[in-house]
Structures are given as structure tokens and as C-alpha cells.
Image: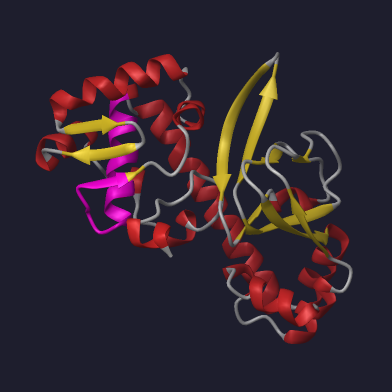
Amino acid sequence: MIDAIAEDVRKLRLFDGVADTTLRKLLHAAYDQSFPPFVKLVEEGAPADFLHLILEGMVEVYAGARQRESTMAVVRPVSTFILAASVRDAPYLMSARTLQRSRILLIPSADLRAAIASDNHFAMNVVVELAGCYRSMVRHAKNLKLRSTRERIAAYLLRQSRILGNVPGYILPVEKRILASYMGMTPENLSRALKSLAEDGCKIDGQRVIITDRAKFEALADLSPLLDGPDVEASQAGVSLPLPLSDLQRLA
């Protein structure tokens, strides 16, 4: 059982090159569980007793205050979420729930901290992972503060296209309501903004994005390496929206 789980988690950069003995210590008391859609996995403010790894499915990480909620990230396999709370032995600053049937591995946070203290290679992997999380959050904050609504939507859509090899069309990886929440706007404002993009070279048909004039659309977004990357560590950190799937991946 442990060998099968180890094979799954080896796909995660956090465990790249980690000694088998360290990995076995991390997994010996871990829970490998499946959850149906819309189950709350983590409660904001609760003690961070476990590090969560998503092995299958999709998880939304969100925060709330004064009866408001905002999507902070949507995580796909294989990724961790809310790593910092487990490292610091601090309360979770965000909640998490499944968006579809998901397989989650729960590693006791105490075992995580013990592995960091005893294995220098694993400790460096944790530092790199946390750095990726930080850089991704900084990019998102810069987008919210430095771009208009239409500019940040255009930048997001173009980044997704670029990840797939600058394809002219693809399917949005999340529902529009989640995209709106992540972008800091209401679904109504997002809908109006998406419709207005047609005049700037991008048509939205349901969940499909069709870039009709890339030069014009890029002029609106004005992509910048310091705002948009590429940044492999940040892109894989599990603290943003998920990467898009190509049509071939969807059929696999």
C-alpha cells in the first residue's frame, strides 16, 4: 500500500529525489481517502493537523469574512495545498472543498516537520515549494492591483493559451463563477467583461475561448515577465487556478 502511494506522490516536486526512508516515514501514518464533490476538507482557522495532497480530482481553496467568500486557488493533481500552515504549526488561513470526486492524501503535520528537520534534501524541496507559492501569490496580488478588470482577464486567458503552445482556442479549466471570484469580481461583471473582449480579439462561447486577433488581444493584456512569468516553480505551486487541459488530454 505504501509503495503504491509513494509512486503517486513521487510525481510531486516536493518529493523529488527524497530518500525512500524519509518518504516512508512521511507515509506510515498518512490517510489515503476519497471524497465526493463539495465536501469541506479544511476549515479556515482550524489547527493545521495535516498536509493535504490531491492525487485525483479537483479542490477549491477559498477564504471568507463577513458572509463573503473568495476563491484563492483551484488545485489539480498532483499538488499540495496550504503547506505553510503545516510547516509553521499554525491555523489554516484558508478553507478547502472538493469540486469533484477527489482522492486526497493526508500527511500528519508533525511527521512533515520531523522530516524537514532530519532530511536536508527534503527541507530544500519544501523551501522551493514555499517560494513558488509566495511568487504565485505576489503575481496574483500585482494583477489585482495594477491591471483593470479587462486587462487582467485578457492576461489570464492569454497565459492559458501560451501554456498550451499559443493555441487559438481552448476550454476554460474552471467554471466562470470561480474565475470571477479568483479575479475579485462578481459573475455579472465577469460576464460583461468577457462579452466586451470580442472587440479586442477574443470571443467566449460558453466555456470555450477563441482568440480571433492575437496581436490586438496581446496589446490589451500587455503581458510582462514580472507580472505573468513564465515561472515554473510558481506555476506548479498549487496556489492559482489550474492549468488548462488540451483536447487530447481531455480525451485521454
Q: Position of residue 85 (x, y in %)?
A: 75, 48
| Residue 101 or residue 150, whichever sits in front | 101
Q: How many marks?
A: 0
Residue in the image at 70% along x and 19% along y: 65
Check the image and report above or below for 207 versus 106.
above
Quarter of image, res 231:
bottom left
Query: Seen from this angle, which residue lies furthest bottom?
Result: 20
Q: Position of residue 118 (x, y in %)?
A: 81, 77
Residue in the image at 63% along x and 76% along y: 10
Q: Position of residue 157 (x, y in %)?
A: 31, 40
The reply, left or right, for residue 193 in relation to residue 102 is left
Q: Position of residue 117 (x, y in %)?
A: 80, 71
Check the image and report above or below for 100 versus 129.
above
Magenta stretch encompasses residue 213: no
Which stretch did the figure color magenta?
A: 150-170
Check the image and report above or below for 169 versus 105.
above
| Residue 57 or residue 135, whichever sits in front | 57
Magenta stretch encompasses residue 168: yes
Instruction: Name the colour scheme.
Output: secondary structure
Q: Quadrant of the N terminus?
A: bottom right
The reply, left or right, for residue 212 in relation to residue 19 is left
The reply, left or right, for residue 59 in relation to residue 50 is left
Q: Quadrant of the C terminus?
A: bottom left
Name the dominant secondary structure of the magenta segment. Answer: helix
Residue in the image at 49% along x and 49% along y: 135
Quarter of image, res 107:
bottom right
Quarter of image, res 51:
bottom right
Residue in the image at 85% along x and 69% along y: 114
